[in-house]
Amino acid sequence: MSTPPLRKDAAQNRQRIIEVARRYVDDGRLLQLNDVARTASIGVATVYRHFPTPEALLETVALPAVEKLLRRAERALAEDDPWTALRDFLAAAIEVLLTDPAVPPVFAAGTDALEHTGDLKRRLVTAFAELLARAHAAGVIDSGVAESDMTPLLCGIAYAANIQSALDPTERATLGLRYLDLLLTGLHRP
């Protein structure tokens, strides 16, 4: 059973809420629904009707980047070379983590406000596990590297790049990709 389409005014309000939330997230501001309603010039009840929690709104803001990352994972799974596939997916993940401030807290959350978010995250984990397994099977990555090792390593790369506050997001992403390259050089088994 699908959800009926929103009325035109309701769809416009929803889009306005998301746009304001996007600005809040990009500016590093705390996402409070009452503040978003005030900035969007929309009633508080309208905001809560669309997004019952700040987490639901944050996940909606992060959704395009998470969906893009999943498409990158699917392309990586179609890549013939296991090393290139793994490297390209990890580079895409670092890029998303460093250029979209909505994504890291969504990935770090222990629970998901939206069912769709949980589904996307599970699909990403499955794709990553398959990419890593293919790299192991091909002998192109250190056999001791486990899935559970990679998440903290990627978080460390993101943290190391993000502490460079004088850099803009694109420059931080470039730096994060450099750090990833250094890490992968150590893990690669040519």
Image (tube, rainbow, N blue to C red):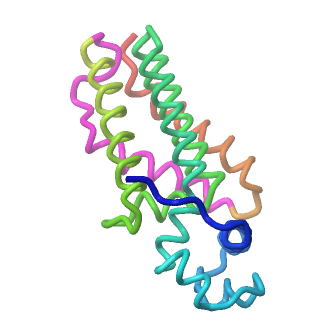
How far across and how far down the image is residue 16, in percent? Answer: 74, 71
Using residue 173 as the reference point, say whether residue 103 is left or right of it: left
Q: Is residue 48 magenta?
A: no
Q: Is residue 90 above or below residue 4?
A: above
Using residue 107 as the reference point, say whether residue 72 is left or right of it: right
Q: Is residue 148 magenta?
A: yes
How far across and how far down the image is residue 48, in percent? Answer: 54, 84
Q: Nearer the viewer, residue 128 or 119?
A: 119
Quadrant in which residue 17 is drawn: bottom right
Using residue 68 as the reference point, say whether residue 82 is left or right of it: left
What residue do we see at 53% from left, 43% from top? 67
Q: Is residue 184 above or below residue 119?
A: above
Q: Nearer the viewer, residue 76 or 149?
A: 76
Q: Nearer the viewer, residue 80 or 71?
A: 71
Quadrant in which residue 181 is drawn: top right
What residue do we see at 50% from left, 63% from top? 59
What residue do we see at 74% from left, 47% from top? 170
Quadrant in which residue 134 is drawn: top left
- Magenta span dominant secondary structure: helix
Q: How many marks?
A: 0
How far across and how far down the image is residue 120, in percent? Answer: 41, 47
**Span highlighted in magenta in the image:** 138-164
Q: Is residue 133 above or below residue 55?
A: above
Q: For the C terminus, give its image quadrant.
A: top left
Q: Is residue 34 above or below residue 1?
A: below
Using residue 56 as the reference point, say whether residue 147 is left or right of it: left
